Amino acid sequence: MSPFAAQEVNEGPMVQELRRVLGRLETALSAISDALVITDDQGLVIWCNQSFDRFINQPRMLSLGRPILPLLPRDHQGEPLLAAHVIATASRLPGSTTVLLQRQPLQACEIEWRPVDSEEPAPVIFCIRDISSRISNQELRATAERIEQQRQNSDRLNRELQQQQLALANLVRECSVTGLPNRRGLRERLDLALEQLSQRDGLLGVLFCDLDHFKDVNDMHGHQVGDALLIEISKRLQESLPADATVSRLGGDEFVVLTGRIRDGSEALAIARKLQQRIGEPWLMHGHHFTPSMSVGIAVTDDPAAEAEELLRRADVAMYHAKRSRNESIALHDTSIEARFSASRRVHQELRRAILNQNLSLAYQPIVSIQDHAARCNSHESDSASGDGRILGHEALVRLRPEQGLPIDSEQLILEAERTGMVLELGSWVINEGLRQLQPHPQRPDHWSLAINISPLQLEQSGFAGGLLQKIEAMAIDPRRLVLELTETRILKDTKTGIEALASLRDHGVRVHLDDFGTGYASYSWLARLPIDGIKIDREFTAALGRDSRRERMTSSMIRLGLDLGLEVVAEGIETEQQRLALQAMGCCLGQGHLFGRPGELP
């Protein structure tokens, strides 16, 4: 006796009877002419009868587990037999429809669907019935024409609804969140203000205000808090302005203020500072403290014939300049700002082309020892490799070969890459090219190292450290010869991810230096937070040696602090022998600048 037979004997009479009933039911359902199919609540086929197999001209085993919609034939217009929304709602609501198939001769079908309410989530039973015999050929064609007419009417109705919605949108003049005039309302008020310029003295000022880091508020606390902050900002702006001024919200975190009559640009600057001061007052929401801030760009005119859109563009350009500035968060549009904006746009275009065409190169600036005895320093090289003025490594500096025009300044290049996110592609190219130079080379001593600048955006990318270490291993590079310089103005946004990446790299021997130390975000607080091996004293401190006693004392204290913490200390921008001697007297170990060599080819 087979094991299956033994199982049947052991099942008992009730189970056996159930099997027989199910078998009869399967036979009966397969014998009927209506096509039956059962889907789950997601529209996947879980059972069908033989009539359904014939209807779709496909064996059952190829249908099970597949979505029902692609299995069904097309209607006479080539459209899906069932709309997607039918599948989405069929597990909740029964229904039916009549369709004409894309077949010759023309065939009419009635499709009914009903959920199986006894299960949760509910499967759906579809019954497809051929009703062509009930309809004459003439009626079939008439039905086809009627369905086509209904479709055309539906399309026309949709177009009319879209036009009505557009017409309604054109009537809306207010922001739905703040109640302030929106872009359309602002344009009307700006046109009116320009017309009135000919009837009164004074200038019209346009202040383009952009909140700083507003996206972070939405991301961390949700759009409800973000909207509440926008409402609060709108109130503060209105409270800080005279009655004849206009505040509008363009969208997102952008607000525009139209001043009343002002005497000159300096008065517009004073208004902007007042607004910034009011906006910067602390704000409490749901137990969270916020200190908002904003950048402001200003355009002024006394010309009634000025174009409204051009005024807004100038104010926007000035705001863009203010947001990028390290020292100022307000800017008044002038020709120099316009020139810088045009230059930035050119850099963006050239950088995009250079990345796509690999039209990039690296220049290498030497890093030398400026101490007679390296043992006094915490540098990586051995005593035998030291010596005053001896080259211990190079810094790789990316260069762009423009297709036309003058060469592009490296700092401007990096700032634009950071701003646009292209620094990820640019940084990947720099790392690959730099690692290629670090491979064993007979003309380079073992102590020689290469410093490569990396962006915080790269560190915050998942898998950055692991990917870099894999490349180092695959290329047989000693990781101790690679120095990563963490640069730019904002250090790390996602501190946890960045610090973990740095720690992983250092654990494997890669060294990390904090660039531009003493300026911007590269300050003392990061020495305690970041896993680093060294600091690079910014060139503005080096340039002040012998000319600015306060900066000179600051430079000396930074060098002492670095050495006390066991860090390598590199001074940038050394151009004179006097600067080298002063840094040497302060205990600085390593130097870099035009005194020792300009960026160029590797020896």
Image (cartoon, rainbow, N blue to C red):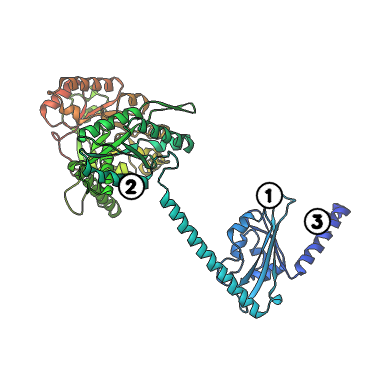
Amino acid type at mark 3: Pro
- Residue type indicated by callout 1: Pro
The answer to whether one can see residue 439 in this image is no
Apparent side of residue 502 relative to residue 382 in the rendered image (left or right) = right
Q: Mark 2 belongs to which amino acid? A: Glu
The kind of secondary structure element at disc 3 is helix
Q: Residues within 10 Å of mark 3 (few under 14, many from 20)?
A: few
Does any portion of residue 331 appear in the rendered image? yes
Q: Where on the picture, by quarter, is residue 388?
A: top left
Q: Nearer the viewer, residue 224 or 342?
A: 224
Mark pair 3, 2: CA separation: 87 Å
Residue with the mark numbered 2 = 188
Question: Disc 1, disc 2: CB below 8 Å?
Answer: no
Instruction: Decide: few, some or many residues near mark 1? Use Cα within 10 Å; few <14, some 14-19, many ≥20.
Output: some
Q: Nearer the viewer, residue 292 or 557?
A: 292
The local secondary structure at tag 2 comes to: helix
Give the percent coordinates (x, y) of residue 201: 20, 38
Q: CA distance from mark 3 to mark 1?
A: 36 Å
Of mark 1 and mark 2, the one earlier in the sequence is: 1
Front label number (3 vs 1): 1
Q: Residues within 10 Å of mark 2 (few under 14, many from 20)?
A: few
Q: Mark 3 near mark 2, Cβ–Cβ under 8 Å? A: no
Q: Nearer the viewer, residue 126 or 135?
A: 135
Residue matched to label 3: 3
Number of numbered discs present? 3
Regarding mark 1 in the picture, which secondary structure is present there?
loop
Query: What residue does disc 1 label?
Result: 121
Judged left or right of residue 8, residue 487 is left
- For marks 3 and 1, the one nearer the N-term is 3
Residue 477: where, in percent of width, then height?
Answer: 33, 41
